[in-house]
Image (cartoon, rainbow, N blue to C red):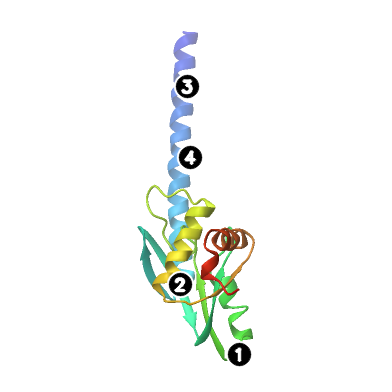
Amino acid sequence: MLVSILLWLLGALILLAAGVAVTLVLATRWIAAKAKRLVPATGKFIEIGGNRIHYVETGEGRPIVFLHGLGAQLHHFRHTLFTSFGHGYRLIALDRPGSGNSVRAKGATGRLPEQAEIVRRVIERLGLEKPLVVGHSLGGAIALTLAVGHPRLFPA
């Protein structure tokens, strides 16, 4: 009798845990859909090695690439710094892979060298010569990894 009660309680706990898991998955999908409605993609997209990278750009002249930190998106630069620059600059802000409106490729790790390589390829595809790269927090670590691995990309 005790064994059957324990089995019944165990089954009830498993069903409860499954119900909580399903509820959390559905809530996450609902929150993600709401976030996409509130902050829609406003820029362009470029495919780099299976990554769909969202970026915005404005202006003409010397290129400056902005890389945001962990848990952020390109709008943190766009709405704060883009209006501070005068003429003579081409300002480009990226959503890092897996952040904002960018999608990370299947099997991607998100490690610094991998993200730096994606940024290098974006710079190459956009035809940016000797860009300045500005990174905040994790974006700064990616910028440093890029500079160490590809010093010829940057002004002396």
CA gap, disc 1 and disc 4:
52 Å
Mark 3 is surrounded, within 10 Å at the Cα level, by few (under 14), some (14 to 19) or many (20 or more) other residues, namely few
Amino acid at pointer 4 = Val
- Mark 2 or mark 1, which has the lower sequence index? 2
Q: What kind of residue is marked 3?
A: Leu
Q: In this rendering, would 5 be left or right of 83?
A: left
Residue 20's disc number: 4
Can residue 73 be seen by looking at this rendering?
Answer: no
**Which secondary structure, mark 3?**
helix
- Whichever of callouts 3 and 1 sits on the residue coming sooner in the sequence is 3
Q: How far apart, in angstroms, are the residues tagged by discs 3 and 2?
A: 50 Å
Q: Amino acid at mark 1?
A: Gly
Mark 1 sits on what residue? 86
Determine which quarter of the picture holds residue 103.
Answer: bottom left
Depth order, front residue of 150/66 = 150
Q: Are marks 3 and 1 in contact (CB under 8 Å)?
A: no
First in sequence: mark 3 vs mark 2: 3
> Residue at image x 64%, y 85%?
84
